[in-house]
Image (cartoon, rainbow, N blue to C red):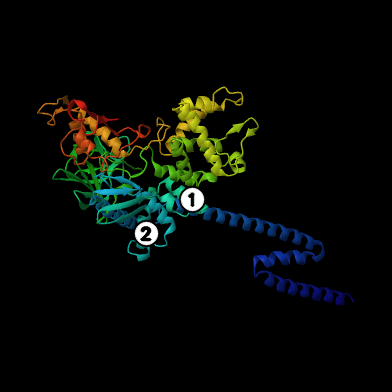
Amino acid sequence: MQLKKREVRDKIKQIEEVRNRIFLRKISKSRVERTVNFFFFQGRRSNKKREWKQSSTQIFLLKFATVLTLSLIVMMVGIFSMVSSMVTQADELELTKVWTYLTELDADKTLILKKHSGTQINHERTERVAKTIKSDIDSILSYLDIQADKFQLANQAFKSKLNLLHDQLWELDPDTKNSQLRTRYLSQIIEWSEELKQRLHLKMEVGPYNHLAELHSPFKEGNIQINQRYGYYVKDQVKACFNGIKLQAKENEEVFSPLAGKVIIADGVIHIESHDRKLRLTNVSPLVNNTSEIKAGELIGNVIKENELTIEYSKKANVVNPSFYFPQVEYVEKPDEMLDFQNQSFDEGRFRQTIVLHCHAFSDKADKIITEAKKNGLSPVIFAAIMIHESAWGKSKGIIENNNPAGLMSENGLVSYPSLDEGIEATGRTLKNLIVERQLITVERLGSVYCPVGADNDPTGLNHYWVPAIKQLLVQLGGSTDMSLLWNSGSSFAQQLLVKAKSLHQTNVQYSQGSNRGTWPYHDCSSFVIWAMNELGINIPFGNTETLYGLEGTILKAITRNEIRAGDLFIWGEKGGSAGDYGHTGFF
Protein backbone atom coordinates (compact mmCIF):
# COMPACT_ATOMS: atom_id res chain seq x y z
CA MET A 1 0.00 0.00 0.00
CA GLN A 2 2.87 2.32 0.92
CA LEU A 3 4.62 1.46 -2.35
CA LYS A 4 1.54 2.27 -4.27
CA LYS A 5 1.27 5.63 -2.51
CA ARG A 6 4.95 6.32 -3.21
CA GLU A 7 4.49 5.36 -6.85
CA VAL A 8 1.47 7.63 -7.06
CA ARG A 9 3.44 10.51 -5.50
CA ASP A 10 6.33 9.86 -7.92
CA LYS A 11 3.94 9.74 -10.81
CA ILE A 12 2.33 13.04 -9.75
CA LYS A 13 5.79 14.55 -9.35
CA GLN A 14 6.77 13.41 -12.84
CA ILE A 15 3.55 14.82 -14.28
CA GLU A 16 4.17 18.18 -12.54
CA GLU A 17 7.75 18.27 -13.85
CA VAL A 18 6.54 17.60 -17.38
CA ARG A 19 3.84 20.27 -17.02
CA ASN A 20 6.40 22.77 -15.73
CA ARG A 21 8.75 22.04 -18.60
CA ILE A 22 5.93 22.58 -21.08
CA PHE A 23 5.01 25.89 -19.37
CA LEU A 24 8.60 27.12 -19.32
CA ARG A 25 8.96 26.43 -23.01
CA LYS A 26 5.75 28.39 -23.66
CA ILE A 27 6.63 31.46 -21.61
CA SER A 28 10.07 31.75 -23.20
CA LYS A 29 8.45 33.02 -26.40
CA SER A 30 8.16 36.67 -25.31
CA ARG A 31 8.37 39.02 -22.37
CA VAL A 32 4.69 39.88 -22.72
CA GLU A 33 3.63 36.22 -22.62
CA ARG A 34 5.83 35.57 -19.59
CA THR A 35 4.23 38.40 -17.68
CA VAL A 36 0.63 37.53 -18.54
CA ASN A 37 1.05 33.80 -18.01
CA PHE A 38 2.91 34.33 -14.80
CA PHE A 39 -0.05 36.13 -13.26
CA PHE A 40 -2.42 33.63 -14.76
CA PHE A 41 -0.39 30.64 -13.52
CA GLN A 42 -0.11 31.92 -9.96
CA GLY A 43 -3.84 32.12 -9.50
CA ARG A 44 -6.47 32.95 -12.07
CA ARG A 45 -9.07 34.32 -9.68
CA SER A 46 -6.90 36.22 -7.20
CA ASN A 47 -4.67 37.92 -9.80
CA LYS A 48 -7.06 38.66 -12.62
CA LYS A 49 -7.89 42.00 -11.01
CA ARG A 50 -4.20 42.83 -10.68
CA GLU A 51 -3.72 42.06 -14.35
CA TRP A 52 -6.62 44.37 -15.29
CA LYS A 53 -5.25 47.20 -13.15
CA GLN A 54 -1.87 47.04 -14.80
CA SER A 55 -3.42 46.95 -18.28
CA SER A 56 -5.59 50.01 -17.50
CA THR A 57 -2.55 51.95 -16.36
CA GLN A 58 -0.66 50.94 -19.44
CA ILE A 59 -3.57 51.96 -21.69
CA PHE A 60 -3.86 55.33 -19.93
CA LEU A 61 -0.14 55.98 -20.28
CA LEU A 62 -0.25 54.89 -23.90
CA LYS A 63 -3.15 57.26 -24.62
CA PHE A 64 -1.44 60.10 -22.78
CA ALA A 65 1.80 59.52 -24.66
CA THR A 66 -0.10 59.41 -27.96
CA VAL A 67 -1.94 62.67 -27.26
CA LEU A 68 1.29 64.33 -26.12
CA THR A 69 3.13 63.13 -29.21
CA LEU A 70 0.38 64.36 -31.53
CA SER A 71 0.34 67.72 -29.74
CA LEU A 72 4.08 68.04 -30.16
CA ILE A 73 3.79 67.13 -33.83
CA VAL A 74 1.07 69.76 -34.37
CA MET A 75 3.15 72.33 -32.50
CA MET A 76 6.25 71.51 -34.53
CA VAL A 77 4.26 71.71 -37.77
CA GLY A 78 3.02 75.12 -36.65
CA ILE A 79 6.55 76.25 -35.83
CA PHE A 80 7.89 74.99 -39.15
CA SER A 81 4.98 76.65 -40.94
CA MET A 82 5.67 79.93 -39.15
CA VAL A 83 9.38 79.70 -39.93
CA SER A 84 8.64 78.96 -43.58
CA SER A 85 6.38 82.02 -43.62
CA MET A 86 9.19 84.19 -42.31
CA VAL A 87 11.97 82.91 -44.55
CA THR A 88 12.03 83.27 -48.32
CA GLN A 89 11.85 79.80 -49.85
CA ALA A 90 13.00 80.81 -53.33
CA ASP A 91 16.46 79.87 -54.55
CA GLU A 92 18.89 82.76 -53.99
CA LEU A 93 19.95 82.84 -57.64
CA GLU A 94 16.30 83.03 -58.70
CA LEU A 95 15.83 85.94 -56.30
CA THR A 96 18.51 87.89 -58.16
CA LYS A 97 17.04 86.95 -61.56
CA VAL A 98 13.54 88.09 -60.57
CA TRP A 99 14.88 91.25 -58.93
CA THR A 100 16.80 92.09 -62.12
CA TYR A 101 13.77 91.46 -64.30
CA LEU A 102 11.58 93.76 -62.18
CA THR A 103 14.17 96.54 -62.41
CA GLU A 104 14.15 96.07 -66.19
CA LEU A 105 10.37 96.47 -66.26
CA ASP A 106 10.80 99.67 -64.22
CA ALA A 107 13.42 100.95 -66.67
CA ASP A 108 11.30 100.15 -69.74
CA LYS A 109 8.36 102.17 -68.40
CA THR A 110 10.71 104.98 -67.33
CA LEU A 111 11.99 105.24 -70.92
CA ILE A 112 8.43 105.60 -72.20
CA LEU A 113 7.73 108.39 -69.70
CA LYS A 114 10.90 110.25 -70.59
CA LYS A 115 10.04 110.25 -74.30
CA HIS A 116 6.89 112.30 -73.73
CA SER A 117 6.92 116.04 -73.14
CA GLY A 118 3.58 115.91 -71.33
CA THR A 119 2.44 113.20 -68.95
CA GLN A 120 -0.64 112.86 -66.79
CA ILE A 121 0.22 111.02 -63.59
CA ASN A 122 -2.73 109.97 -61.44
CA HIS A 123 -4.87 112.35 -63.54
CA GLU A 124 -2.59 115.34 -62.94
CA ARG A 125 -0.53 116.86 -65.74
CA THR A 126 3.21 117.15 -65.20
CA GLU A 127 6.03 118.54 -67.29
CA ARG A 128 8.74 117.08 -65.12
CA VAL A 129 11.70 115.63 -66.91
CA ALA A 130 13.13 113.49 -64.12
CA LYS A 131 10.50 110.76 -64.11
CA THR A 132 11.82 107.49 -62.72
CA ILE A 133 9.77 104.42 -61.83
CA LYS A 134 11.10 102.33 -58.96
CA SER A 135 9.01 99.49 -57.56
CA ASP A 136 9.14 98.26 -53.97
CA ILE A 137 10.74 94.99 -55.04
CA ASP A 138 11.31 93.63 -51.52
CA SER A 139 7.56 93.62 -50.87
CA ILE A 140 6.83 92.13 -54.29
CA LEU A 141 9.29 89.26 -53.76
CA SER A 142 7.88 88.53 -50.29
CA TYR A 143 4.35 88.39 -51.68
CA LEU A 144 5.29 86.22 -54.65
CA ASP A 145 7.27 83.84 -52.45
CA ILE A 146 4.08 83.17 -50.48
CA GLN A 147 1.66 83.04 -53.41
CA ALA A 148 3.58 81.64 -56.38
CA ASP A 149 3.70 77.88 -56.97
CA LYS A 150 7.01 78.08 -58.84
CA PHE A 151 9.41 80.92 -58.09
CA GLN A 152 11.34 80.63 -61.35
CA LEU A 153 11.72 83.33 -63.96
CA ALA A 154 11.97 80.67 -66.68
CA ASN A 155 8.47 79.47 -65.75
CA GLN A 156 6.12 81.22 -68.16
CA ALA A 157 3.18 81.29 -65.74
CA PHE A 158 5.33 82.91 -63.07
CA LYS A 159 6.75 85.45 -65.52
CA SER A 160 3.25 86.33 -66.72
CA LYS A 161 2.22 86.89 -63.11
CA LEU A 162 5.20 89.24 -62.68
CA ASN A 163 4.22 91.23 -65.77
CA LEU A 164 0.59 91.49 -64.66
CA LEU A 165 1.58 92.59 -61.16
CA HIS A 166 3.93 95.26 -62.51
CA ASP A 167 1.27 96.54 -64.92
CA GLN A 168 -1.16 96.85 -62.02
CA LEU A 169 1.37 98.83 -59.99
CA TRP A 170 2.32 101.07 -62.90
CA GLU A 171 -0.56 101.26 -65.38
CA LEU A 172 0.82 103.11 -68.39
CA ASP A 173 -1.16 104.07 -71.50
CA PRO A 174 1.18 105.89 -73.91
CA ASP A 175 0.08 107.57 -77.10
CA THR A 176 1.93 109.61 -79.71
CA LYS A 177 2.00 112.90 -77.77
CA ASN A 178 1.23 112.24 -74.13
CA SER A 179 1.21 109.32 -71.72
CA GLN A 180 -1.19 108.45 -68.92
CA LEU A 181 0.25 106.82 -65.80
CA ARG A 182 -1.73 105.48 -62.88
CA THR A 183 0.26 104.36 -59.87
CA ARG A 184 -0.86 102.00 -57.11
CA TYR A 185 0.70 100.31 -54.12
CA LEU A 186 1.00 96.56 -53.68
CA SER A 187 -1.42 96.64 -50.74
CA GLN A 188 -4.07 98.11 -53.07
CA ILE A 189 -4.01 95.32 -55.64
CA ILE A 190 -3.71 92.24 -53.42
CA GLU A 191 -6.79 90.22 -52.47
CA TRP A 192 -6.13 89.93 -48.76
CA SER A 193 -6.99 86.95 -46.57
CA GLU A 194 -6.21 86.69 -42.86
CA GLU A 195 -3.68 83.92 -43.55
CA LEU A 196 -1.92 86.03 -46.18
CA LYS A 197 -1.82 89.02 -43.82
CA GLN A 198 -0.28 86.95 -41.04
CA ARG A 199 2.31 85.28 -43.26
CA LEU A 200 3.35 88.48 -45.01
CA HIS A 201 3.47 90.32 -41.69
CA LEU A 202 5.82 87.69 -40.22
CA LYS A 203 8.02 87.72 -43.31
CA MET A 204 8.35 91.50 -43.38
CA GLU A 205 8.92 91.75 -39.61
CA VAL A 206 11.77 89.24 -39.54
CA GLY A 207 13.21 90.20 -42.91
CA PRO A 208 12.76 88.03 -46.01
CA TYR A 209 16.49 87.53 -46.63
CA ASN A 210 17.77 87.00 -43.08
CA HIS A 211 18.60 83.38 -43.86
CA LEU A 212 21.02 84.62 -46.56
CA ALA A 213 22.85 87.14 -44.36
CA GLU A 214 26.54 86.24 -44.59
CA LEU A 215 28.26 89.59 -45.15
CA HIS A 216 29.52 91.95 -42.45
CA SER A 217 28.56 95.63 -42.63
CA PRO A 218 31.37 97.71 -44.20
CA PHE A 219 30.75 100.47 -41.64
CA LYS A 220 31.50 100.70 -37.94
CA GLU A 221 27.94 101.63 -36.99
CA GLY A 222 26.48 98.82 -39.10
CA ASN A 223 23.88 100.93 -40.90
CA ILE A 224 23.82 100.42 -44.67
CA GLN A 225 22.01 102.97 -46.85
CA ILE A 226 21.81 102.27 -50.57
CA ASN A 227 21.55 105.19 -52.98
CA GLN A 228 21.69 103.06 -56.15
CA ARG A 229 20.14 99.64 -56.16
CA TYR A 230 21.19 96.52 -58.03
CA GLY A 231 19.72 96.09 -61.52
CA TYR A 232 18.57 98.15 -64.48
CA TYR A 233 18.35 101.93 -64.52
CA VAL A 234 18.01 104.74 -67.08
CA LYS A 235 20.62 107.40 -67.69
CA ASP A 236 20.63 109.84 -70.61
CA GLN A 237 17.72 108.00 -72.27
CA VAL A 238 19.67 104.73 -72.23
CA LYS A 239 18.90 101.58 -70.24
CA ALA A 240 21.86 99.98 -68.45
CA CYS A 241 22.41 97.32 -65.79
CA PHE A 242 24.30 97.99 -62.57
CA ASN A 243 25.70 94.77 -61.06
CA GLY A 244 26.26 96.10 -57.57
CA ILE A 245 24.97 98.47 -54.92
CA LYS A 246 26.19 102.01 -54.25
CA LEU A 247 26.24 103.08 -50.61
CA GLN A 248 25.89 106.32 -48.70
CA ALA A 249 29.28 107.05 -47.08
CA LYS A 250 31.22 110.14 -46.08
CA GLU A 251 34.59 110.95 -47.58
CA ASN A 252 37.43 109.27 -45.61
CA GLU A 253 34.94 107.12 -43.68
CA GLU A 254 36.49 103.84 -42.52
CA VAL A 255 35.56 100.73 -44.48
CA PHE A 256 35.62 97.26 -42.92
CA SER A 257 35.77 93.97 -44.79
CA PRO A 258 32.35 92.38 -45.32
CA LEU A 259 34.00 89.00 -45.98
CA ALA A 260 36.91 86.96 -44.67
CA GLY A 261 39.37 85.87 -47.34
CA LYS A 262 42.33 86.76 -49.51
CA VAL A 263 42.82 90.37 -50.64
CA ILE A 264 43.72 91.16 -54.24
CA ILE A 265 44.22 94.83 -55.16
CA ALA A 266 44.12 95.69 -58.86
CA ASP A 267 43.58 99.04 -60.57
CA GLY A 268 42.55 100.62 -57.29
CA VAL A 269 39.82 98.04 -56.71
CA ILE A 270 39.80 95.77 -53.65
CA HIS A 271 38.86 92.15 -54.36
CA ILE A 272 38.23 89.67 -51.53
CA GLU A 273 38.06 85.98 -52.42
CA SER A 274 36.91 83.11 -50.20
CA HIS A 275 36.32 79.69 -51.76
CA ASP A 276 33.47 80.17 -54.26
CA ARG A 277 32.65 83.72 -53.15
CA LYS A 278 34.11 86.95 -54.52
CA LEU A 279 33.54 90.49 -53.29
CA ARG A 280 34.55 93.67 -55.13
CA LEU A 281 34.81 97.13 -53.52
CA THR A 282 35.44 100.30 -55.53
CA ASN A 283 36.06 103.88 -54.44
CA VAL A 284 38.05 102.69 -51.40
CA SER A 285 41.62 103.72 -50.60
CA PRO A 286 43.19 100.44 -49.37
CA LEU A 287 44.91 100.08 -46.00
CA VAL A 288 45.68 96.38 -46.44
CA ASN A 289 48.44 94.65 -48.38
CA ASN A 290 47.91 92.83 -51.63
CA THR A 291 47.51 89.01 -51.25
CA SER A 292 47.04 89.33 -47.46
CA GLU A 293 44.48 87.26 -45.57
CA ILE A 294 41.87 89.25 -43.64
CA LYS A 295 38.95 88.56 -41.33
CA ALA A 296 35.40 89.82 -41.69
CA GLY A 297 35.07 93.14 -39.89
CA GLU A 298 38.75 94.03 -40.29
CA LEU A 299 39.62 97.59 -41.39
CA ILE A 300 40.57 97.60 -45.08
CA GLY A 301 40.47 101.25 -46.21
CA ASN A 302 38.76 104.64 -46.40
CA VAL A 303 36.09 106.02 -48.71
CA ILE A 304 37.59 108.14 -51.50
CA LYS A 305 34.54 110.00 -52.83
CA GLU A 306 31.42 110.68 -50.80
CA ASN A 307 28.44 108.39 -51.50
CA GLU A 308 30.29 106.44 -54.22
CA LEU A 309 31.29 103.27 -52.35
CA THR A 310 30.27 100.36 -54.58
CA ILE A 311 30.01 96.67 -53.65
CA GLU A 312 29.64 93.78 -56.10
CA TYR A 313 29.24 90.14 -55.09
CA SER A 314 29.32 86.76 -56.83
CA LYS A 315 28.83 83.16 -55.68
CA LYS A 316 29.94 80.15 -57.70
CA ALA A 317 30.66 82.50 -60.61
CA ASN A 318 27.09 83.85 -60.53
CA VAL A 319 26.62 87.59 -60.00
CA VAL A 320 24.09 88.16 -57.21
CA ASN A 321 22.37 91.12 -55.60
CA PRO A 322 24.64 92.06 -52.63
CA SER A 323 21.76 93.61 -50.68
CA PHE A 324 20.34 90.12 -50.00
CA TYR A 325 23.44 89.14 -48.01
CA PHE A 326 23.70 92.01 -45.52
CA PRO A 327 21.70 91.78 -42.27
CA GLN A 328 19.75 94.98 -42.92
CA VAL A 329 19.75 97.63 -45.62
CA GLU A 330 17.79 100.80 -46.30
CA TYR A 331 17.16 102.39 -49.69
CA VAL A 332 17.73 106.13 -49.89
CA GLU A 333 16.69 107.92 -53.07
CA LYS A 334 18.80 110.85 -54.22
CA PRO A 335 16.82 114.13 -54.20
CA ASP A 336 17.28 114.62 -57.96
CA GLU A 337 17.00 110.97 -58.94
CA MET A 338 13.33 110.21 -58.45
CA LEU A 339 10.27 112.38 -58.47
CA ASP A 340 7.66 110.31 -56.70
CA PHE A 341 4.25 110.31 -58.34
CA GLN A 342 2.51 109.79 -55.03
CA ASN A 343 2.39 111.57 -51.67
CA GLN A 344 5.81 112.83 -50.57
CA SER A 345 4.86 114.14 -47.12
CA PHE A 346 4.97 110.53 -45.84
CA ASP A 347 5.74 107.02 -47.03
CA GLU A 348 2.33 106.06 -48.39
CA GLY A 349 3.39 102.51 -49.18
CA ARG A 350 4.38 101.91 -45.57
CA PHE A 351 1.22 103.69 -44.39
CA ARG A 352 -1.02 101.41 -46.44
CA GLN A 353 0.88 98.27 -45.47
CA THR A 354 0.60 99.10 -41.76
CA ILE A 355 -3.16 99.65 -42.06
CA VAL A 356 -3.70 96.39 -43.97
CA LEU A 357 -1.51 94.14 -41.84
CA HIS A 358 -2.17 95.49 -38.35
CA CYS A 359 -5.40 97.45 -38.07
CA HIS A 360 -7.99 94.65 -37.76
CA ALA A 361 -11.44 96.34 -37.89
CA PHE A 362 -10.28 99.07 -40.28
CA SER A 363 -7.63 97.13 -42.20
CA ASP A 364 -9.45 97.90 -45.47
CA LYS A 365 -9.94 101.61 -44.79
CA ALA A 366 -6.66 103.17 -45.97
CA ASP A 367 -8.36 104.84 -48.96
CA LYS A 368 -11.18 106.14 -46.78
CA ILE A 369 -8.72 107.59 -44.25
CA ILE A 370 -6.72 109.35 -46.99
CA THR A 371 -9.91 110.72 -48.58
CA GLU A 372 -11.26 112.11 -45.30
CA ALA A 373 -7.86 113.47 -44.32
CA LYS A 374 -7.55 115.36 -47.61
CA LYS A 375 -11.13 116.66 -47.38
CA ASN A 376 -10.45 118.08 -43.91
CA GLY A 377 -6.94 119.40 -44.62
CA LEU A 378 -5.24 116.84 -42.36
CA SER A 379 -2.25 114.55 -42.66
CA PRO A 380 -3.49 110.95 -43.11
CA VAL A 381 -0.71 109.90 -40.73
CA ILE A 382 -2.00 111.79 -37.67
CA PHE A 383 -5.54 110.73 -38.65
CA ALA A 384 -4.60 107.03 -38.64
CA ALA A 385 -2.31 107.33 -35.59
CA ILE A 386 -5.19 108.60 -33.45
CA MET A 387 -7.51 105.87 -34.75
CA ILE A 388 -4.91 103.21 -33.94
CA HIS A 389 -4.25 104.57 -30.45
CA GLU A 390 -7.90 105.08 -29.49
CA SER A 391 -9.16 101.78 -30.93
CA ALA A 392 -6.24 99.57 -29.81
CA TRP A 393 -5.26 98.78 -33.40
CA GLY A 394 -8.89 98.27 -34.40
CA LYS A 395 -9.73 95.77 -31.66
CA SER A 396 -11.53 97.92 -29.06
CA LYS A 397 -15.15 97.50 -28.08
CA GLY A 398 -15.81 101.06 -29.24
CA ILE A 399 -14.88 100.42 -32.87
CA ILE A 400 -16.35 96.92 -33.07
CA GLU A 401 -19.71 97.64 -31.40
CA ASN A 402 -20.09 101.41 -31.93
CA ASN A 403 -18.16 102.06 -35.18
CA ASN A 404 -16.26 104.70 -33.22
CA PRO A 405 -12.56 104.50 -34.18
CA ALA A 406 -11.35 107.59 -32.28
CA GLY A 407 -13.02 107.31 -28.87
CA LEU A 408 -15.32 110.28 -29.56
CA MET A 409 -17.54 111.11 -26.56
CA SER A 410 -20.75 113.02 -25.89
CA GLU A 411 -22.57 113.88 -22.67
CA ASN A 412 -24.16 110.44 -22.83
CA GLY A 413 -20.86 108.60 -23.22
CA LEU A 414 -19.25 106.93 -26.22
CA VAL A 415 -20.86 107.99 -29.49
CA SER A 416 -22.24 105.27 -31.78
CA TYR A 417 -22.31 105.52 -35.58
CA PRO A 418 -24.41 103.54 -38.10
CA SER A 419 -21.29 102.50 -40.04
CA LEU A 420 -17.53 102.59 -39.70
CA ASP A 421 -17.27 104.98 -42.65
CA GLU A 422 -19.47 107.45 -40.76
CA GLY A 423 -17.29 107.00 -37.69
CA ILE A 424 -14.20 107.83 -39.77
CA GLU A 425 -15.96 110.88 -41.24
CA ALA A 426 -16.81 112.10 -37.72
CA THR A 427 -13.16 111.62 -36.74
CA GLY A 428 -12.16 113.83 -39.67
CA ARG A 429 -14.55 116.61 -38.63
CA THR A 430 -13.34 116.48 -35.03
CA LEU A 431 -9.66 116.59 -35.97
CA LYS A 432 -10.30 119.42 -38.44
CA ASN A 433 -11.83 121.47 -35.64
CA LEU A 434 -8.85 120.82 -33.37
CA ILE A 435 -5.91 120.94 -35.80
CA VAL A 436 -7.03 123.25 -38.62
CA GLU A 437 -9.53 125.61 -37.01
CA ARG A 438 -8.05 125.79 -33.49
CA GLN A 439 -4.48 125.58 -34.80
CA LEU A 440 -3.35 122.70 -32.57
CA ILE A 441 -0.76 121.92 -35.22
CA THR A 442 1.73 119.95 -33.11
CA VAL A 443 1.25 116.64 -31.33
CA GLU A 444 1.93 118.36 -28.01
CA ARG A 445 -0.73 121.04 -28.59
CA LEU A 446 -3.22 118.48 -29.86
CA GLY A 447 -2.60 116.23 -26.86
CA SER A 448 -3.26 119.08 -24.42
CA VAL A 449 -6.88 119.15 -25.64
CA TYR A 450 -7.52 115.68 -27.05
CA CYS A 451 -5.97 113.79 -24.16
CA PRO A 452 -5.01 116.31 -21.42
CA VAL A 453 -2.69 115.26 -18.61
CA GLY A 454 -4.46 115.43 -15.22
CA ALA A 455 -7.96 115.09 -16.66
CA ASP A 456 -10.74 113.96 -14.28
CA ASN A 457 -11.42 110.89 -16.42
CA ASP A 458 -7.77 109.80 -16.23
CA PRO A 459 -7.22 108.87 -12.55
CA THR A 460 -4.25 106.59 -13.35
CA GLY A 461 -2.39 109.23 -15.35
CA LEU A 462 -2.24 107.30 -18.63
CA ASN A 463 -2.75 110.50 -20.63
CA HIS A 464 0.86 111.34 -19.81
CA TYR A 465 1.90 108.70 -22.38
CA TRP A 466 -0.38 109.92 -25.19
CA VAL A 467 2.08 112.30 -26.89
CA PRO A 468 5.06 109.87 -27.05
CA ALA A 469 2.74 107.05 -28.14
CA ILE A 470 1.28 109.13 -30.99
CA LYS A 471 4.76 110.21 -32.13
CA GLN A 472 5.86 106.58 -32.24
CA LEU A 473 2.80 105.73 -34.34
CA LEU A 474 3.60 108.58 -36.75
CA VAL A 475 6.92 106.89 -37.50
CA GLN A 476 5.35 103.43 -37.83
CA LEU A 477 2.90 104.84 -40.36
CA GLY A 478 5.63 106.26 -42.58
CA GLY A 479 5.88 109.77 -41.16
CA SER A 480 8.21 111.42 -38.66
CA THR A 481 7.92 112.68 -35.09
CA ASP A 482 8.07 116.35 -36.13
CA MET A 483 5.98 116.12 -39.31
CA SER A 484 3.21 118.55 -40.14
CA LEU A 485 -0.27 117.49 -39.03
CA LEU A 486 -1.79 119.29 -42.03
CA TRP A 487 -2.46 117.94 -45.51
CA ASN A 488 0.55 118.47 -47.76
CA SER A 489 -0.16 118.32 -51.49
CA GLY A 490 3.28 119.65 -52.38
CA SER A 491 5.11 117.34 -54.75
CA SER A 492 8.66 116.16 -54.34
CA PHE A 493 9.46 118.33 -57.38
CA ALA A 494 8.46 121.46 -55.45
CA GLN A 495 10.55 120.29 -52.51
CA GLN A 496 13.53 119.68 -54.79
CA LEU A 497 13.05 123.08 -56.37
CA LEU A 498 13.32 124.72 -52.95
CA VAL A 499 16.40 122.68 -52.07
CA LYS A 500 18.02 123.57 -55.40
CA ALA A 501 17.18 127.29 -55.06
CA LYS A 502 18.59 127.42 -51.53
CA SER A 503 21.77 125.63 -52.55
CA LEU A 504 22.26 127.98 -55.53
CA HIS A 505 21.62 131.02 -53.36
CA GLN A 506 24.40 129.90 -51.02
CA THR A 507 26.96 130.16 -53.86
CA ASN A 508 27.41 133.90 -53.22
CA VAL A 509 24.74 135.07 -55.67
CA GLN A 510 24.71 138.87 -56.15
CA TYR A 511 21.65 140.83 -57.24
CA SER A 512 21.94 142.64 -60.55
CA GLN A 513 19.63 143.90 -63.30
CA GLY A 514 22.60 144.94 -65.44
CA SER A 515 23.99 143.43 -68.63
CA ASN A 516 25.79 140.74 -66.61
CA ARG A 517 22.44 139.51 -65.28
CA GLY A 518 22.09 135.75 -65.73
CA THR A 519 25.82 135.02 -65.61
CA TRP A 520 27.02 133.68 -62.29
CA PRO A 521 27.07 135.11 -59.69
CA TYR A 522 24.83 137.95 -60.98
CA HIS A 523 21.07 137.42 -60.99
CA ASP A 524 17.86 139.28 -60.52
CA CYS A 525 14.63 137.60 -59.39
CA SER A 526 13.47 136.17 -62.73
CA SER A 527 16.89 135.01 -63.95
CA PHE A 528 17.45 133.25 -60.62
CA VAL A 529 14.07 131.46 -60.81
CA ILE A 530 14.73 130.39 -64.41
CA TRP A 531 18.26 129.26 -63.46
CA ALA A 532 16.95 127.09 -60.60
CA MET A 533 14.28 125.50 -62.81
CA ASN A 534 16.78 124.79 -65.58
CA GLU A 535 19.06 123.13 -63.04
CA LEU A 536 16.27 120.60 -62.42
CA GLY A 537 15.99 119.81 -66.12
CA ILE A 538 13.14 122.13 -67.10
CA ASN A 539 14.42 123.89 -70.20
CA ILE A 540 13.17 127.49 -70.01
CA PRO A 541 14.64 130.18 -72.25
CA PHE A 542 16.41 133.06 -70.54
CA GLY A 543 13.99 135.93 -69.94
CA ASN A 544 11.98 137.76 -67.30
CA THR A 545 8.61 137.65 -65.54
CA GLU A 546 6.86 137.92 -68.91
CA THR A 547 8.70 134.74 -69.95
CA LEU A 548 7.28 133.01 -66.88
CA TYR A 549 3.78 134.35 -67.57
CA GLY A 550 4.10 132.80 -71.02
CA LEU A 551 4.48 129.34 -69.46
CA GLU A 552 0.94 129.42 -68.01
CA GLY A 553 -1.07 126.51 -69.35
CA THR A 554 2.01 124.43 -70.13
CA ILE A 555 4.34 123.82 -67.19
CA LEU A 556 2.72 126.45 -64.95
CA LYS A 557 -0.86 126.46 -63.70
CA ALA A 558 -2.67 129.35 -62.01
CA ILE A 559 -3.82 128.56 -58.44
CA THR A 560 -5.71 130.39 -55.68
CA ARG A 561 -4.18 131.70 -52.47
CA ASN A 562 -5.71 128.79 -50.54
CA GLU A 563 -3.89 126.29 -52.78
CA ILE A 564 -0.41 127.73 -52.23
CA ARG A 565 2.19 125.26 -50.96
CA ALA A 566 5.93 125.45 -50.36
CA GLY A 567 7.82 125.35 -53.65
CA ASP A 568 5.10 127.06 -55.69
CA LEU A 569 6.01 130.06 -57.85
CA PHE A 570 4.58 133.57 -57.54
CA ILE A 571 4.67 136.30 -60.21
CA TRP A 572 3.82 139.87 -59.22
CA GLY A 573 2.85 142.49 -61.76
CA GLU A 574 0.33 142.84 -64.55
CA LYS A 575 0.68 140.30 -67.34
CA GLY A 576 2.03 142.12 -70.37
CA GLY A 577 3.68 144.85 -68.30
CA SER A 578 5.63 143.12 -65.53
CA ALA A 579 9.17 143.44 -66.89
CA GLY A 580 11.91 145.31 -65.06
CA ASP A 581 10.86 147.24 -61.97
CA TYR A 582 7.18 146.57 -62.67
CA GLY A 583 7.29 142.91 -61.69
CA HIS A 584 8.74 140.42 -59.26
CA THR A 585 8.92 136.63 -58.92
CA GLY A 586 10.18 133.96 -56.55
CA PHE A 587 9.40 130.71 -54.73
CA PHE A 588 7.16 130.27 -51.70
For label 1, the crowd category at 10 Å Cα-Cα, with few meaning under 14, some 14 to 19 and many 20 or more, is some
Secondary element at image label 2: helix
184 with respect to 115 (left or right): right
Q: Which percent across, then down, holds residue 502?
A: 24, 29
Residue 575 placement (x, y as % from top left): 24, 33
Query: Which x, y percent locates residue 415?
Result: 61, 36
Q: Residue furthest right?
A: 1
Count numbered badges in the picture. 2
At a point 42% along the width and 33% down the height, the residue shown is: 486
Q: Is residue 254 visible?
A: yes
Q: Nearer the viewer, residue 168 or 453?
A: 168
Determine the residue located farthest toward the left in the rendered image: 515
Q: Amino acid at mark 2?
A: Leu
Dot 2, how many residues are within 10 Å of its Cα: few (below 14), some (14-19), or many (20+)? few
Decide if residue 164 is on the left or right side of residue 251.
right
> Which quadrant of the structure image shows residue 508?
top left
**Residue, disc 1:** 197
Answer whether residue 306 is visible to the viewer in this image. no
Q: Indicate the quadrant containing the N terminus: top left, top right, bottom left or bottom right.
A: bottom right
Give the residue drawn at x 32%, y 35%. 221
Measured as percent of width and height from the top left, residue 186 is found at 40, 50
> How far apart are the alpha carbons under marks 1 and 2?
21 Å
Residue under label 2, please give it: 164
Residue lying at 65% horizontally and 55% vertically, measured from the top left: 64
Q: Secondary structure at mark 1?
A: helix
Dividing the picture into quarters, in which one does residue 260 lie? top left
